[in-house]
Amino acid sequence: MSEHTVRILFLTQDIGFGDALAHALGEGFVSRSSNDSQPIKPNILSDCDVVLIDLRTGSSQAEEGSGLRLLDEIARIQSHPPVVALCDAENHALFSSVLERGAYDSVTNPPNIIELRVVLRRAYKSDAAEKELQRLRDSIRTPNRLHELHGSSPAMQELFTLAQKIASCDVNVLITGETGTGKELLARAIHRLSPRFNEALVAFSCANLPENLIEDELFGHEKGAFTGALNMRRGRMETADQGTLFLDEIGDLSPGLQPKLLRVLQERSFERLGSNKPINVNIRLICATNRNLNDMVRQGAFRDDLYYRLNVVQLHLPPLRERRDDIPMLAQILLTAAAQRFNKKPRPFSRAALHVLEEYAWPGNVRELENAVQRAVVLCDGSTVDLCHLPAALRGSFEEPSLSCSYEDEVRQFKRRLVLRTLRQCGWQKATSARSLGVARGYLHRLINQLEIKESEEENLPERIREQGVPPKQLM
C-alpha cells in the first residue's frame, strides 16, 4: 500500500542545504525551500503538509531569532500544518522553547535522515488524524464513517461502499471478523441504511448457551410448554418481525438448531415451543461470526445449505493490526468520547503514547483499544496522555530506556524497531521496504545483518504478538 507523499516546506536561509536535504529525504517526500523573511501568510502554508524550520547555529534565522518569530506566526494561523524544528543537539533551551511555542517535535543537527523521515511522517499522520476527527465532529456522516464505524484505510473504505450498496437490498448478510472488530456496529449501520430502519433491530448472541435456551430465546414458548413456563413468551424472531434480526456468533449454533433456522429462512414461519400453530414473519437476517464457516462446512460441523442461505453477501471486518493507519483517528475519537463520559478535559496523546498504540498488535481489536484509551483518560492528570497511562501489556519493550543505556544502544534499538516495522508493513519485501525507508536495497541488507534480524524474527512483536497468532512472514 503506497503512502501519501508528504509535502515539506523548509524555512531556511541556506537554500543549498535545503536542496541537499530534499534529495536526501528521497521517495515519499516532496520538499521546497523558502528564505522569505517576510511575515508568514496562510497561502504559503496551503500546499504543504509539514513545516520544517532551520534553527541551527550559524543560520541567519537562528542569529536574528527570526526562526522563533516564524514559529509564533505559524501558531497564530488557524488550521496550520505541524511544525518540526531543526536545532543543534547541545542547545537544550531551544529544544524546550520550540515545543512550548507549539512545534510538533524537534530534530537534532546534523539530522539523521531515517529519524527525520519518521518524525516528518508522524507529524503528518498526527495532523491528518486531528483534521479527520474535526471533520467527524462537524458532519454526521462522512466518507470515512459509516454511522458508528470509522476508518480511512482502503479496506474500510471498500467495506463502507459495499455495505451502502447492499443495505437497500433485502438480502441476508454474513459479517466475518475477529472478536472486537465491530461486527454488531456494522449490522446496525446496515439496518439504519435499509428500508426497515423504522422497525426494530433485534440482536442475539448464540455463543456459550445451551441449545434449549437458544431455541426458547429465538422462537419463544407457550404457557405450560415446560416446567416454569408460567406465561406465553414471544421470541426474538417474532419481536424482529418487519425489522432485522442480528444473530452474533452464528458458528456456535448447535447442529440441532441449524435445520430449524434453515426452515425459518425457507418458509418464513416457525412455531413457538409447545405450539403447532405457525407464525409468519418477515425479517431480514444478518449474521456474524469469528469462525471460518467454510471450514466448518467441510468438517461437517455446519450445514452447507444453511451456510449458502446465510452467505448471500459476505462482509469482512479487518483486524486492527491490518489497518494501523486508522489507529490515530480511532484513538482520538475514543479519547474524546471517554473524556466526555468521565467528565474530564480531553488531553492529547504524547508522541510516545501514539507510537505505542500504532505498534501494538491489538488482539482484542477496537474493543481492546477502547478499554486502553478509557484507562488512560481516567489515569491522566497531566497535560498529555503519556506512555505511563497505558496498560503494561501495551508498553512492553517500548518503555523508556534506562539511564544506563548508551547512546549507541538507543540508536541501534531505534533502527531495529524502524526496520522491523517497515518490513512488516511492506509484506517483508526488501525492495519495497528499501524504497519506503529511502535507502538502497544493499544498505537495507547490511542493516538486517548488522541488527541480527532473522527469518524467524519476532522481536518487538515478541511474546505478545506470538501469543496473538500473528506469524512472522518469511524474508524475501
Image (spheres, helix red, strand yellow):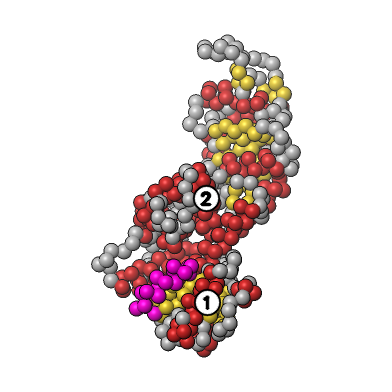
Q: Helix, strand, or loop for circle 2? A: helix
Mark 2 closeness class: few <14, some 14–19, many ≥20 residues within 10 Å: many
x, y (%) of residue 33? Answer: 56, 82
> Which residue matches tag 1?
70
Helix, strand or loop at label 1? It is helix
Residue 171 x, y percent position in the rendering: 71, 39
Q: Amino acid at mark 1?
A: Leu
Depicted 252 relative to depicted 475: above or below: above
Query: Residue 28: which disc?
Result: none
In terms of depth relative to the viewer, which is nearer, 345 or 125?
Answer: 345
Q: Position of residue 425 (x, y in %)?
A: 50, 63
Q: How many marks?
A: 2
Evaluate if marks 1 and 2 touch, with contact meaning CB atoms under 8 Å apart: no
In the picture of the structure, the residue carrying the numbered disc 2 is: 336
Q: Image check: 127 left or right of 201?
A: left
Which residue is found at the position 66% from the left and 25% from the top? 238
Q: Please provide the residue range marked out in magenta.
A: 88-105
The residue sitting at 74% across, 38% down in the picture is: 195
N-term mark: 1 or 2: 1
